[in-house]
Image: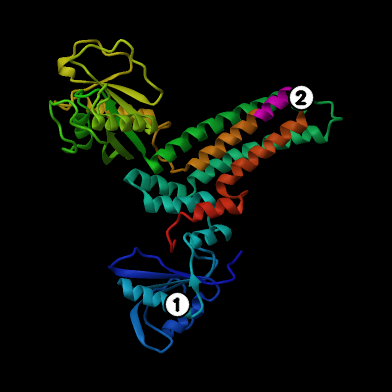
């Protein structure tokens, strides 16, 4: 598929800079470049100095011309880059001239969309382009590049191969019922189902880690007044982010701070002390604290080690109990609690590791990649259909099992885009920046 029209956009950020780039893609790209520069048949992938002129032959700018002959280009079409001076006015004037010569303004993400439609990249790689640009940490950049290079897609395709082999086995049993061998009862098929489930489970864990690297997490620091929540925030940020005082109730609103913890983008939220009060302003802060506690990915429930342990200490799945003031401890910490001293900055590394263990489902290594929530949804949908296929197999319902496996394959194919709707593509590429 090649676009019938030619698109153009400024590919560099808005503002003033040393260099600005106009990107052009489509069948008229080279003709437009020739019209602006007077250069005929430029050698592909060779930078040429050029003067950019409008239709009245007035000089707009000068810089470099780069030509990429399709299909050996990012979009799979003829692509031209005009690299000039990075001023706001000069870039828009140059773009206006390109559009007057026969191009149109590109939509957000349209260059990447054409690369996908022309099978230069799959949908996972297209999304990884946006992830590289928006990465909030060094680890996220590296993991996004792995996804862009096809690591995630390779894992998906390996599972797809297992899925196809299982489908072939089941459908063969349906097509040849007269055979003496009962294919549906064969132990090999059972093992294929087990291995498929295991592969999907591992893939889900890797994908959840990828989403965490991509999107980051929010951590709410909650507890009663004067237990050391703000001091703990300062320890985690390594800065005097929040005001610390012996007076209870110093924090009445939410204090937000963005940090990176072992490569994970994190938003810390220090909240007002939760307690009974008749003060209207304090109550508003407490209401906000309770709401943030409910919405946060991880909750640090801070207790005062110098006081008695609460009789009922209930915690949710995403909650970490933190005992502060370890130097003044008056009770034995409950199992799983992390003991720290914010004042003396002790136990902070152990707390950080507990947070990482809470949110990272697999070890960060050379196969770690970034991912998105939609990938998790599709893997879970695949797991559901595989489980249903196995259930039907146990009931000797080969046709129903084969249909569930077909639905599982479609769900998994939607991750890479081999099976996708126009609505899905619209939602994905609409979130890209213009020029990418």
Q: Residue at x 30, y 27 (%)?
A: 300
Q: Position of residue 146 (x, y in %)?
A: 43, 47
Q: Which mark is residue 98?
A: 1
Residue under the point 37% across and 51% down: 134
Q: Quadrant of residue 170?
A: top right
Does the magenta-highlighted stretch encompass residue 302? Answer: no
Q: Residue 389 colored magenta? A: yes
Q: Is residue 434 left or right of residue 330?
A: right
Query: Which comes sooner in the sequence, label 1 or label 2?
Result: 1
- Residue 188 visible (yes or no): no
Q: Residue at x 51, y 38 (%)?
A: 376
The N terminus is located in which quarter? bottom right
Identify the secondary structure beneath mark 2.
loop
Label 1: state its secondary structure.
helix
Identify the residue under disc 2.
396
Which stretch is magenta? 388-396
Measured along the vertical axis of the image, is residue 316 above or below residue 103? above
Residue 280 appears left or right of 116: left
Distance of mark 1 from mark 2, alpha carbons? 64 Å
Q: Quadrant of the C terminus?
A: bottom left
């Amino acid at each position: 598929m090649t676009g019938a029209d030619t698109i153009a956009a400024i590919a560099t950020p808005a503002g003033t800079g040393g260099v600005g780039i106009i990107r052009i893609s489509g069948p008229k790209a080279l003709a437009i470049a020739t019209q602006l520069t007077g250069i005929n048949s430029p050698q592909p992938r060779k930078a040429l100095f050029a003067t950019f002129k409008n239709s009245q032959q007035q000089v707009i700018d000068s810089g470099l011309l780069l030509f990429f002959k399709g299909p050996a280009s990012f979009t799979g079409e003829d692509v031209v880059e005009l690299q000039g001076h990075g001023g706001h006015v000069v870039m828009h004037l140059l773009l206006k001239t390109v559009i007057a010569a026969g191009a149109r303004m590109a939509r957000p993400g349209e260059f990447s969309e054409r690369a996908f439609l022309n099978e230069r990249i799959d949908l996972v790689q297209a999304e990884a382009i946006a992830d590289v640009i928006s990465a909030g940490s060094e680890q996220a950049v590296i993991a996004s590049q792995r996804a862009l290079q096809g690591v995630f897609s390779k894992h998906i395709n390996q599972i797809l191969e297992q899925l196809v082999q299982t489908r072939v086995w089941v459908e063969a049993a349906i097509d040849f019922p007269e055979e003496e061998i009962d294919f549906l009862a064969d132990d090999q098929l059972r093992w294929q189902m087990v291995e498929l489930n295991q592969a999907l489970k591992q893939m889900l864990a890797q994908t959840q880690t990828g989403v965490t690297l991509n999107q980051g997490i929010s951590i709410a620091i909650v507890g009663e007044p004067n237990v050391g929540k703000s001091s703990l925030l300062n320890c985690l940020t390594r800065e005097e982010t929040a005001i610390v005082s012996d007076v209870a109730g110093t924090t009445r609103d939410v204090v937000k701070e963005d940090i990176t913890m072992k490569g994970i983008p994190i938003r810390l939220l220090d909240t007002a002390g939760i307690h009974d009060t008749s003060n209207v302003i304090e109550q508003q802060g407490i209401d906000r604290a309770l709401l943030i506690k409910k919405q946060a990915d991880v909750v640090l429930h801070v207790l005062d080690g110098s006081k008695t342990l609460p009789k009922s200490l209930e915690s949710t799945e995403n909650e970490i109990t933190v005992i502060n003031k370890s130097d003044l401890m008056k009770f034995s910490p409950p199992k799983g609690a992390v003991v720290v001293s914010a004042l003396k900055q002790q136990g902070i590394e152990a707390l950080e590791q507990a947070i990482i263990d809470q949110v990272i489902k697999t070890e960060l290594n050379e196969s770690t990649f970034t991912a998105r929530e939609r990938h998790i949804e599709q893997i879970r949908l695949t797991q559901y259909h595989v489980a249903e296929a196995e259930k039907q197999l146990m009931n000797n319902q080969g046709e129903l099992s084969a249909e569930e496996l077909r639905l599982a394959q479609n769900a998994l194919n939607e991750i890479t885009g081999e099976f996708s709707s126009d609505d899905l593509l619209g939602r994905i590429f609409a979130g890209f920046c213009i020029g990418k």
